Image: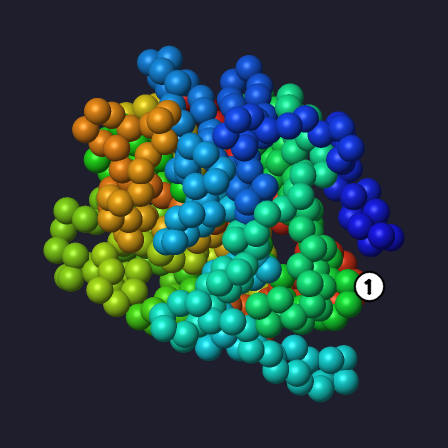
Amino acid sequence: MRIHALLLGAISLTGATAASIPAPDPNGKYWLNTSSISLAFIPYGASITNLLLPDKHGNLLDIVAGYDNATAYTLDAAHPHFGSVPGRYANRIKNSTFSIFDEDGTETKYHVTPNENNGLNTLHGGPDGWDYRNFSVVAYTPSSSITFSIVDPDGKEGFPGEVVSYITYTVSNSTWDIKMVALATTKATPIMLSSHTYWNLDGFELDDALGHELYMPFAGMRVGVDGILIPTGEVLGNERGGINDFWSRPKKIGEAFGNDTKENGLEGNCGTGCTGYDNCYIHSLRPSPPSLSQSWRDPSQMVARLSSPHSGIKLEVYSDQDAFQMYSCNQQKGDVPLKWTQGTDTLRTIPKYGCVVLEVQDWIDGINHPEWGRTSKQVFKPGGDPYVLQARYVFGVDK
């Protein structure tokens, strides 16, 4: 209980307490409303389910993917991680294994539950990771914030030690703030979280999101991966003018799709047989910084801007994390229904390339690459500093 109290104090909870938390709406959603934006969340995966704001014509658009009812999240066997907090370790773990070293250098090897590529690796914490579970709502003020909590027990999915975590979402005017805090209570353990939100700034009014413009001014490098998106240990430069260059200028996500995808390298860029993006971009000021472990930016600076000329809606992302996964929804097949707040008479499902996932996080699979110098940012011990992720999403409209 002392650890729980310390975490609660660290994230400065305000508003309603657990004993007086207002009930969700009939669809199981908790809404946060300002005069500019409205957001809805559910305990399952501490997920965002709706985000509504007016476009340049004054039409109200819902710009995140999800389901109309909270129950639907537990029924979809495909489980696309809509709007959730994947944990306790986001993204992929090679061979579903990692080692943790004691202060005296003693190595302890761990094997976590695989759930991808026929058992070759673990994705987003395993088959019963955090975004398959219901968090508790511990504080909720409809005009400003909601906080979810989860206690992940020792040995769950093979991860060592108990982890206690609090996820706080706060809204003010046209801004959505995220703070994720997690504490290892009994054993050293890897922790890396993220927000796995699927964006479509047109509210799915068009056939795809390839016309969205993306700018990542610090994304000079990316993590090299193999055909199943497992890091190889390479750190690659995103050369100016190349398909992964989103740092030298803003460009449409689909800009390279009009060219010969085999010739320019877009085919296979997101894995074997995949055309598009599913890449971990590293924040740096140039493609080849002298120190891989050194941060090259001020956390208060914008790390990404996504905008749509169709709706005029733009999203600026600020983060204290040193990497950024961008996924262009290459695996969507038109079999996931849109919400009643989205789409058109003819477009009622999410098409291939119909959305963009932007994940603030650290370097993926850093626990298996000590040469990157990420251990202190990904492995946490009892009595040490907590894991903390902070991100800010600022919304606007260009008319």
In the rendered structure, the answer to whether residue 364 lies left or right of residue 188 reads left
Residue 111 found in image quarter: bottom right
Q: Is residue 296 visible?
A: no
Question: In x, y percent, where is residue 218?
Answer: 47, 49
* Image location (x, y in percent) of residue 28: 54, 32
Residue pointed to by mark 1: 383
Is residue 262 visible to the viewer in this orientation of the structure? Answer: yes
- Label 1: which secondary element: loop
Image quadrant containing the C terminus: top left
Q: Residues within 10 Å of mark 1 (few under 14, many from 20)?
A: few
| Colouring mode (rainbow / by chain / secondary structure / one colour) | rainbow
Q: Amino acid at mark 1?
A: Gly
In the picture provided, is 4 more to the left or to the right than 329?
right
Which residue in the rendered view is the most extreme toward the right? 2
The answer to which of 157 and 370 lies nearer the viewer is 157
Q: Residue at x 42, y 64 (%)?
A: 223
How many numbered marks appear? 1
Furthest toward the left, the residue is: 260
Depicted 181 relative to depicted 93: above or below? above
Residue at (45, 50) in percent of width and height: 81
The residue at 84%/47% (across/down) is 5
The residue sitting at the top extreme is 58
Please give the name of the residue rendered at 36% of the width and 31% of the height, measured from the top-left corner: 339
In the image, residue 267 sits, relative to residue 211, either above or below, namely below
Give the side of residue 58 with respect to residue 301, left or right.
left
Where residue 90 appears, as percent x and y from the top left, is 52, 59
* Whole-percent x, y for residue 294 in the image: 59, 61
